[in-house]
Amino acid sequence: MDPHERMRFERATLPHLNAAHNLARWLTRDDHAAEDVVQEAYYRAARYFNSFRGDEGRVWLLSVVRRVAFDWLAKQRAQSAAVFNEEFHDRGDESSNPEFRAIQKCDQESVRQAVEELSPPLREVIVLRELEGLSYQEIAKVIEVPIGTVMSRLSRGRQQLQQRLASPPEGAGTT
């Protein structure tokens, strides 16, 4: 890659490194695998940068990350055995109020668990929309489906999240 092309590649992709890692982490459910996926995605992105057209580096890069993540998942026989790095995801309030911290941690854990329980197609649109802030059009480009499919998956994903978060935890009964 010549220096001009390298600079163009870096401008188009490096600002989106955190978003790439976030998507890979949610799709693989494994922080170390996410690092490998992002590294492979950047390698592929650099290798095929000549196919990049336009100014939407974020969308283009996230579509590469998505493909690499799904390639990685396809190689894994036991997808459910993936490890979730609790310390990495726990970004709770550092307030000195222990009760507030306990409630907040419980709420974060419930949301994290509910998102993880979604099927990969629903989980990816929720992550791209709610955590990465992509528009419906951008999500459609990243996952290569019609915008109507994005809207449908978001609706179903939000509905399932709402149901999971509204229902009492297993084992919690009334007295």
Image (cartoon, rainbow, N blue to C red):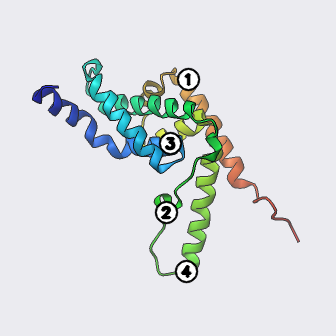
* 64 relative to 121 in the view: left or right: left
- Closer to the eye: label 3 or 1: 3
Q: Earlier in the sequence, mark 4 or mark 3?
A: 4
Q: CA distance from mark 4 to mark 2?
A: 18 Å
Disc number at residue 87?
Answer: 2
Question: Which residue is the site of mark 4?
Answer: 98
Q: Of the residues shown, which amino acid type is indicated by label 1?
A: Gly
Marks 1 & 2, CB-CB < 8 Å contact: no
Q: Of the residues shown, which amino acid type is indicated by label 4?
A: Pro
- Closer to the eye: label 2 or 3: 2
- Indicate the position of residue 14 as horizontal and vertical percent values: 26, 40
Nearest the eye: 77 or 63: 77
Q: Residue furthest left?
A: 3
Marks 4 & 2, CB-CB < 8 Å contact: no
Q: CA distance from mark 1 to mark 2?
A: 36 Å
Disc number at residue 126?
Answer: none
* 1 relative to 116 in the view: left or right: left
Question: Which residue is the site of mark 3?
Answer: 127
Q: Earlier in the sequence, mark 4 or mark 2?
A: 2
Q: CA distance from mark 4 to mark 3?
A: 29 Å
Q: CA distance from mark 3 to mark 1?
A: 17 Å
Q: Which residue is at a point 82% across and 62% down the rendered structure image?
A: 171
Marks 3 & 1, CB-CB < 8 Å contact: no
- Indicate the position of residue 11 as horizontal and vertical percent values: 20, 36
Q: Which residue is at a point 67% across and 41% down the rendered structure image?
A: 159
Write down the quadrant of residue 19 in the picture.
Answer: top left
Task: Work out whether 160 lies above or below 49.
Answer: below
